[in-house]
Amino acid sequence: KLCDKLEQKNVFYACTVPFLFFFAAFAWFIFPNTGVLHPHAFCDTIAALLPAGFSAPLAIVRNWSYAVFYVMAEMWGSVVASLLFWGFANEVTTVDEAKKYYPLFGMGANVALIFSGQYVKWVSKMRGNLPPGVDPWGVSLKYLMGAVLASGA
């Protein structure tokens, strides 16, 4: 239905921008403030009232930001990388062009995986050189989400 109401370019932005805003908010606001944002006291109170079988759902509520990040990261790969890219590729290429260019698009995607793996490896090694008192996961998260934002811009 969104494709019926908007141009292809605007559909792409309407689907991509919320992900980019979330990833930016997670890296620079939500993650640094999880101590305030996670309802640990509330979950402790509820856990005392509920049977032990509710510990898994309460753990998700207790750490809601990580659960939402996981879902958004999984959806990013499915929605943005696959659905929107190939929808856009279908929109801008003819059938004859598709025979020629789709294999190149596939090769480009595989080369991008190699470079992204090298980037993640570099960010992981960088964490070991940080001074004491600096949150290494927070720094690497900002570098990784910055790369996501740069690739989505």
Image: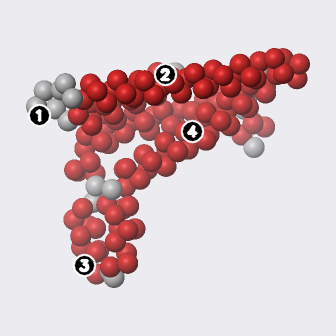
**Number of residues whose C-alpha sits closer than 10 Å to that of mark 4, classed few (under 14), some (14–19) or many (20 or more):** few
- The residue to which callout 4 is attached is 77
Left or right: residue 102 versus residue 137 is right
Residue 56 quadrant: bottom left
Task: Give residue 128's position: percent from left, percent from top.
Answer: 21, 29
Labels 1 and 3: the sequence-earlier one: 3
Labels 1 and 2: the sequence-earlier one: 2
Front residue of this view, candidates 5 and 124: 124
Residue 44 quadrant: bottom left
- The residue to which callout 3 is attached is 48
Tell me the amino acid under the disc marked 3.
Ala
Q: Nearer the viewer, mark 3 or mark 2?
A: 2
Task: Give residue 2's position: percent from left, percent from top.
Answer: 71, 40
Front residue of this view, candidates 151 and 10: 151
**Number of residues whose C-alpha sits closer than 10 Å to that of mark 1, classed few (under 14), some (14–19) or many (20 or more):** few
Task: Give residue 57's position: percent from left, percent from top.
Answer: 40, 68
| Secondary structure at numbered mark 3 | helix
For marks 4 and 2, give the CA distance.
16 Å
